[in-house]
Amino acid sequence: MSRPVVARTMYGMGGSVTDPGAHTFTEALRSAIPGIDLGRSPYRDYDVQEIADDFNHSAPNAVRICVGSSLGANNCPVVAARTKVLVHGIFGFQASSYGAHMAITQNVLFAHLFRNPLWPMTFGLGTGKWAPAEGNSRTSLIVTSEYALHPGETPKAMSTFLAEIKRIVAKPGDGDLTA
């Protein structure tokens, strides 16, 4: 790894009691990317400013990744909006229709959300949908529908996110910031 990688994962409401998949995904990230800085991940969904501060204080050439489940997924765009730095990727497992709904700002290069559009399967807890902020043509956004129970850290979603994060770490897509 030639550049530092700073990643933060966030639980949904209820933390590890209702969202054990966030811990599973955090450990998968730790195994997949040697030397990754995960801080004290997974964080609680309301630790948004602490995560934004971690990104703001990271090395200028750091690759920054934010991942969240449920309300944590709702807060990934909020984290990015509170940073003064480039965020290379945000990833969400089933954002809730009841949480924060902030558009994705231009400082995010890549965003991928797995959601369940079928309200009765999650009672709206996994039906949230991300969108770019008005005028944001920079962010590459993918929204994948998967009919899974909430909070949605399915094997398919986890393996997809791990592959995408590895790709971003290998080729951050932000020009030459390796100095």
Image (cartoon, rainbow, N blue to C red):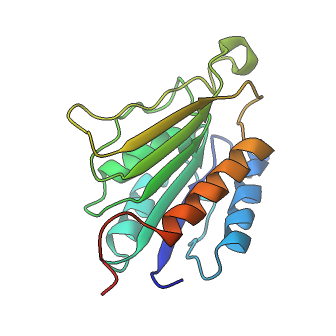
- Is residue 46 rendered to the left or right of residue 78? right
Determine which quarter of the picture holds residue 8. Answer: bottom right
On the rendered structure, is 12 left or right of 21? left
- Percent x, y of residue 2: 48, 85
Residue 177 is situated, as x and y percent measured from the top left of the image, at: 30, 77
* Name of the residue lying farthest toward the left: 135
Quadrant hosting residue 70: top right
Query: 75 and 6: which one is in front?
Result: 6
Give the image location of residue 147, x and y in percent.
73, 24
Tell me the residue at 53%/26% (across/down): 128
Image side of residue 177 versus residue 147, left or right: left
Task: Between residue 171 and residue 126, name the one nearer to us.
Answer: 171
Residue at 65% from the left image edge and 80% from the top image edge: 34
Q: Left or right: where does residue 167 sit relative to residue 104? A: right
Q: In the rendered image, which quarter contains the N terminus?
A: bottom right
Relative to 89, is 27 above or below? below
As drawn, 19 above or below 179: above
Regarding residue 18, the answer to whether it shows in the image is: no
Up/down of 162 relative to 143, above or below: below
Looking at the figure, which quarter contains the C terminus? bottom left
Identify which residue is drawn at 65% across, 58% down.
162
Q: Can residue 81 be seen in this view?
A: yes
Percent from the top left, x then y, of residue 3?
Answer: 45, 81
Q: Which of 16 and 80 is in front in this view?
A: 80
Query: Which residue is found at the position 52% from the left and 24% from the top?
Result: 98
The total of numbered circles placed on residues is 0
